[in-house]
Amino acid sequence: MVKAICEECGLIETVNEQVEWDDQQCRLSPGHRTMALVMNFLAEGQPMYRLSEFFEKSDTANLFGENISPENLSDTTFGRTLDKIADANPRILFGSVLAEAIGREGVTTNVVHADTTSKSVQGIYEDENDEYDLEITQGYSRDGNRHLNQFQIGLAVNRNGVPVIGDILDGNDSDTTWNTELIGELRQRLAADEPPIYVADSAAMSEDSLDEASAAGIDIISRLPRTYNAVDALIDRAWEIDEWNDLGKFVNDEDDEDAASYQIQTFQKHISNHDLRCVVVHSSTLDGRTNRRIDNDLDSTEEDLEDAVGQLADRSFACEPDAQEAWETWLDDHDDSCFEFEAEVVETEQKKSRDKPGRPPKDWDPYETVYKIAASVQRDAAAIAHRKKRASCFVVVTSLEDSEEWAGEDVLQEYKEQQAVERRFRVVKDPKRVGPVFLDRPDRVEALGYVMLMALLVYSLIERRARVALQGADEPMDLAGGPTSFRPTGRRVLERFENMLVSRVDGKREIPDNVDVPKRVLELLDLDVTAYGIESEE
């Protein structure tokens, strides 16, 4: 049998070997159609990882040592390697690798951006005897795979996206708890002389986190979650004062026509027993999900109001004052700032009903005068526009006191750089880089998680080296396919080496004459052809 994985939602399926891969449709998410082959099965439940085949066209002797051949790189070897990493305490091991890399590469850690994500795994991983440190279980899934167990990844990177701290966490660990613990350990884990500035999303905003940061002398930049009443109060105050500082688009967004422009107002607020600077931010672009939520809420409210108006119109009143009083009571119960109401009391005749059966008396008047309410509901465009403008506001908070060194604009800019850690999660979770995880023990899963973080570290350093070298360059780097860039991603740098070919002639490694060696890219990375086991041309 053949297993395939949906590159968008991560669902693994058994499919026919003869299937047309580009035309596959995901069973879980019908809108997803791209499927990628991940492994062959000789029999159901008997996976053959075929690592040896993966390395068949690689120079394993140059990569791993002269005596290493593809046959040595089997799934058994991989499992034993994970066991050795697990026995060596992978968290401490990875911390040592990080410290060495930070020192060698001169990576700055004065500002760190932290966040967590989840990684779904195949399998049950029951640990009844609490034998393993890592608990693989269900939790809040960022992958959308809520039917699968998972572990979590806690990652802190610097402004350039280079990992400086990484943790593999239980599948149901709390983001808030991890942030609090990391803040308390931050200076020790970074071996930093000066306390770094800690940037994180709203999960870092808790009284415990603020207490830890204050005790450690660490300043925080975060987003105030809407669970705090202070958010609405600050936004209301900002619109009431209406003295916005127009920042426009930020430098990194200037070439993006759809990029938002920003306005800010800054206030001081006492939150969770700490005095914080609060930057109320108004974005010109409303988040798509928020916009849809508001529109859906307006549709639902309008439907309810029209039903309620219909029920009111069916009622009859004996006099005009009674009808007017009923309308005012209804308005108190249904008033909504996003809707306008119009109503008038109408005098009309209606047929009376008799309480007694039989023929009515001769002086019986079958009609009576009653009063009804004719009302209409329509949307208030101006109020809705204001509601959406208000919804496009959020509050960034910081404990940084120096408003000259860290103006409100700088605080917002640093918070926006939180994308640095989010971009790294996209790398480590890309199903084309990291396929479905199915190992037999939680300690091996944990070890694999740290191997993934080590690979991410190398990827990030490759990107950093290229970008640092290009900062003072006159010419951009040529990318695969023709474009150029002064800020290539790690993926775009590595693409330049995909067509490299090394052959052996009489036991000596050589690069064929028809192979285009990306010499400039090697120079940007402070490397040369000796990386391929070839003697330098100099």
Image: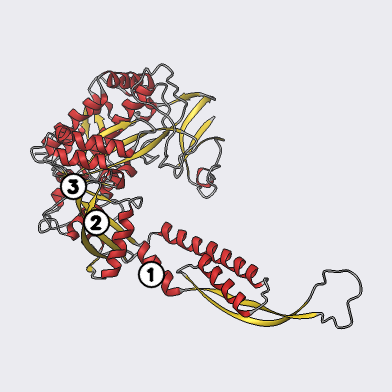
Coloration mode: secondary structure
- Earlier in the chain: of badge 1 and badge 2, it is 1
Q: Position of residue 495 (x, y in %)?
A: 29, 45
Q: CA distance from mark 3 to mark 2?
A: 13 Å
Decide which of tag 1 and tag 3 comes sooner along the chain.
1
Nearer the observer, 373 or 252 = 373
Say few, some or many: other residues with alpha carbon within 10 Å of mark 2 (under 14 / 14 to 19 / 20 or more): few
On screen, residue 429 versus residue 471, left or right, reads right
Instruction: Report if residue 478 is visible in the image.
Output: no
Q: Residue furthest right?
A: 359
List x then y, in percent, for residue 533.
Answer: 19, 31
Q: Position of residue 391 (x, y in %)?
A: 37, 62
- Tag 3 residue: 466
Query: Which circle, 3 or 2, is nearer the viewer?
Result: 3
**Which residue is labeled 1 in the image?**
386
Q: Can residue 422 be seen by looking at this rendering?
A: yes
Q: Position of residue 330 (x, y in %)?
A: 56, 68
Residue type highlighted by circle 2? Thr
Question: In screen coordinates, is 232 left or right of 518?
Answer: right
Which residue is rendered at x = 42% and y = 74% of the image? 382
